[in-house]
Every structure is written in structure tokens, then in C-alpha cells.
Amino acid sequence: MKLLITDKINHVELTPLKKYFDIDVRIGLSPVQLENIINEYECLITRSATKVPESIIDKADKLKIIARAGIGVDNIDIFAATRKKIAVINAPKGNARATAEHTIGLIFSLLRHIPQANRDLINGQFNKSKYTGFQIKGKTLGIVGFGNVGRQVCRMANGLDLKVIICEPYIRLPKKVRHVTYEELLKESDIITFHVPSTYLTKNMLNKNTLNLTKTGVCIINCSRGQVVNEKAVIEGLKNGKIKGFAVDVYKEEPSFNPELVNLPNVIATPHIAGSTHESQKQSVSEVVSGIISLIKNIPPPNLLNPQVFHKEIKTSARGKKIFEFDSVIFDCDSTLSKIEGIDELAGFYGKKEQISRLTRLAQEGKLAFEDVFQQRLNILKPSRQSLEELSELYLNNLTEDASQTLEALSFLEKNIYIISGSYTHALLKLANKFNIPSQNIYANDLIFDKKGNFIQYIEGPLKRNHGKLQIVRRIKGRKIMFGDGITDLETRYLVDLFVGFGGVQIRPVVEEESDIYIYNPSLSVALILAAGYNGAVKLLKTKYRKLVGKGIDLLSHPKHTKIKKGAPTPLFHFRQLAYL
């Protein structure tokens, strides 16, 4: 096999790959040159300089792996790679420490005016009284994103006596960390630092509207991606005093940058060096090398960004029971826990149900990209806080058949229940409260409203393919089973121990075809049996849920109500034995 390296990296760490590949190093290729030779290679390693768009991926008929020796992958078309079954991996931990250290350094530099004071000295000015700064002790630091970098920043900040608050829609946070919404973070923070990837969800997270929610005199740091911050809004905020200081390491179109921004006296700018240390470059290469070797051995590495390309084999135990023992049970909400499509009902409040329903259907069937549809629907509706309150009532009043008892029974069995939905957090919390599902187990989309409850902006949520639902499910520990009706639910099937398609409300042909188990009946009793497992079902037979167990077994056993794909693991024989208990 052949491996191509197109950017400067640490070559010492590549030694383990020589056992598997003939390695070519060709730095500085033009897009046309890369397009002409990519068909010769099974593996490609890049950093940020090389762009890998769809046009190049289309020519890469042999390519199996694209490895980015760094954390950001906005230079790679992951969707195009996924369509061609090409694995994309990165190095999320390699430069995390370096980027976090740079962030902390920028915080000190902003509050103590270090670069400005240094510049004055170089120019012969000893302006001691001009640069009276602030101590960081006791200041509130808002960290947007709690991935590898955000986690390191949090750890360092705690050691410096900063009060830390975190906005993170995907990762379950440690108990000692205070989790807040983005709106709360904006309002409470003295210092805000961004550590998020560049996606349609995070584009312009900091803009004129969100900046209006911050304290006057806030300090802001961006070491994530240039697209996260609206430069025009930041420049205006720096000039009118809303922003005390702005530190930036990343730009929209690198290596270009905005001179108007970086030349402002209260701006500290560095040329995307936050993650660039000798140690981090070595660690990043080592991390992708490890991932490449895992893929060669047919083992999914933790840094695999599109797990849909990896087909995990599910092994059945000798007795056929143990594989149906799950720690966590994950549900979609719309057309699964509830009979309604929330966004469509929301559209009904505004007289636009038919228009929105069409977009929803096309997305669910995989004919339109979810991220595009989501933005279109929001632009049309701009829902208010009051309308989401009304939607929450609709969810509760339209639960799927046996949903209430199923959730209660799973709680009785002490299963960890999660709801991961493309709906809105505000509309799901009432449902979660009714069934004692912890709020931290609810993952949906958050909106920001003004004081009157009118829509301002969409800010975060699990809808992004290869980003949202996948990243959430990936981090849920233990053995897990998921129930869902749509394409984005189906995409998680290689990250869970069992994915079950639910067509009791609406049959989605793609999900029906590709699910190992597919439920046609509107009752969730089958879901209870599968999630409870054999031993759990035995326990339930001694409770008030006995009849529900019997109903679930009957429906699971009947091909009219439940489709079980040939070769899929299912201990039907053992479940049927329960009828005699």
C-alpha cells in the first residue's frame, strides 16, 4: 500500500507505518497536482495547508484513510469521504495542551496589557501608569466547548482561582463543573474563550445579537476557528467599549487577516500558533499513526470522525442473552417517544405546517442535508419561547402507545435513559421532568430569546451529521441501545451495541432497510423488551408491568410487527421462554 504526505510533519513518529506502507512525501502540491496523483494512494496524511475537497476525493478510488495531523478538519470534505467509505481521523489530543497554554497566556496578556506595554518600551516610552491591569483571581471565565482543549483550559483556570462556567451541548460534564446555556455564559462571564469546531452550528456564534448579551468590558479569546466570531461585530464592540480586549489566533481565510481588526490597540493577534509546539507536533503525528494502524487492523480508533464507514461485527454470546443487557437506553423524541414531528407542529402555530413538513420529510428520507433543512426551517419560523412551551404540552399529550409505562419500567430497572433529538431543549425538559430523566441526559437544540421571549438565534444542538448525535452517542458509557426513526438516528448504529429502527409512527424506507431490527407496531412495548433484556424482563414479570412484557414479547415474535434482519442477533428463543414464567 502507498501513503502520501502533503504537509510538513514530524517524520520520526511515522516509523511504525513503514511496516504497512510505501511512504511518499510531496510538500506544496497544487490542487490540480494532488487531484492527478491521489488515485495512486490508499492513505493520505495532511495538516491544515492541504485542502481535500470533494473534487479530489472523487478521484481517490483507492483511498481508504485521510488523516489530519491536528484537530481541525474543515479543510476536508467529510461528507464526500463518508460517501466513498473513506475513514477520516484527526489528532484531537495532540495539540490540546499547547492550545490551552496559549489561551491562558492570552488571558494574562489581555488583562495586563503585556504586548502593548512591550511595544511602548521598544518605541522608547516608559508608560508605567498607562497599563494598570486586572488580576484574574475571582473573574468568571466562560468556556464555550468542553472538548480536549476546553477541558485543559478549565483545569488550568481552576488552578488560577478563576470561576469557571461551561457551555457544552454534547459532552457530559464533571459534577464539579458548572454547566450553563450559551445565553447564561454570555451574560455572566468576565472573560469568554471559544474552543469549538467550525460547523454551521458554530458559525458566527459571537455576533452583534449575542454580543449585546455580554457584560460591558468583557474580554474575548478565540483560539478555535475564525468563522466562530463575526469580525465586524467584534470591531464595533472594541470601538464602543462593549469589549475591553480581544485576543485572536485564528482567521476566516488564512493566511489572510483583517488589518482593521489586528491594528486596534485593544487587540492581541497571533498567526495561528496556539497549537504549534515541538511537543504537540510530535504528539499529533503519533496520534494519527496509532489511528491508521487501528483501522488497518479493523479496530475503530477513538479519533475516527465518520464511524459510519466502519462496520462493527456484533458477536452473540453462546446462550444468546448477554448481548441484550444494556446500561443505557437512547431514544429519539419525534415520531418515536412522541407521535408528533415537533417542528411540523410548531409550524402549525404559524400557519406554515405544509411548507415545513415537506422539508422535514425530505431530510428524514435523506434527500436533503439536515443542516440545510434545519437552517431553512428556523429562518421560516423563528419560534418564540411561548411556542416551545405549547410544543412541550403537545409532546406530553401525544406520547407513543405504551411510552409512559416503558419509560417508567426502564427507570425501575435503573437504566440510564437519554433523549437525543433534533427538537428543542426548551420543549423537551417538561417531558424529561415527568419521567425523572436527568436534564443532563437531554440533548436537543438550544435557542436564544430576547427579554420578551422572541427568537434571536439558534446556537447549539445535536443535529449536525458527523458532529452532533454521533459525538453524543460516542461519549455515552457502557453498553447502549438506541431507538429512532430517522437518518441521523440510523447513522449512530456503529457506535451503539444495538440500533432499533422505529416505524410505529412513520416508516422511513432507508431506516427500515438498514436496521437490524425494525418495529412496525405503534407500541413501545417491543422497545421495552429489547432494552430490558432477558434478566430485566424477568424482573418486570413480578411487577405491575407484567402485561406490558407479555405484549412486547408477542409483538417482537410476530413478523408483521417486528422485522429482524437475517443474521441479526436476537435471543427470541429466550424471550419466548418468558411466556411460561
Image (spheres, rainbow, N blue to C red):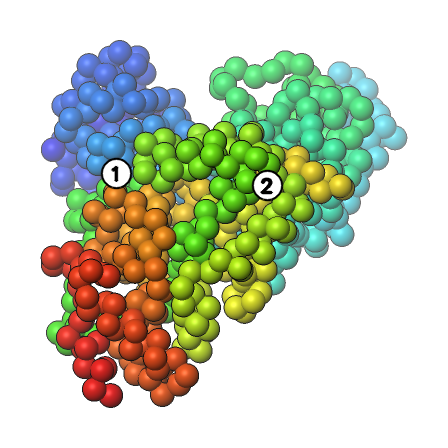
* Residue drawn at x 40%, y 55% as measured from the top left: 336
Q: Do tag 1 and tag 2 residues touch (Cβ < 8 Å)?
A: no
Which kind of residue does numbered mark 1 sit on? Ala
Is 193 or 230 nearer to us in this picture? 230
Quadrant in the rendering for residue 571: bottom left
Question: In this rendering, which labeled residue sits more in front, label 1 or label 2?
Answer: 2
The answer to whether 213 appears left or right of 406 in the picture is right
Q: Which mark is residue 349?
A: 2
Q: Secondary structure at mark 2?
A: helix
Is 424 or 11 nearer to us in this picture? 424
* Residue drawn at x 30%, y 12% as measured from the top left: 30
How many residues crowd mark 1 within 10 Å: few (<14), some (14–19), many (20+)? Answer: many
* Residue drawn at x 41%, y 33% as measured from the top left: 358
- The x, y position of residue 424, in whole percent, is 54, 47
The answer to whether 506 appears left or right of 259 in the picture is left
Location of the C terminus (image quadrant): bottom left
In terms of sequence position, does the residue under pointer 1 or pointer 2 come before the other? 1
Up the image or down, 261 lies above or below 156; here it is above
Q: Which mark is residue 87?
A: 1
How many residues crowd mark 2 within 10 Å: few (<14), some (14–19), many (20+)? Answer: some
Asked whether residue 279 is in view, the answer is no
Up the image or down, 524 lies above or below 32; here it is below
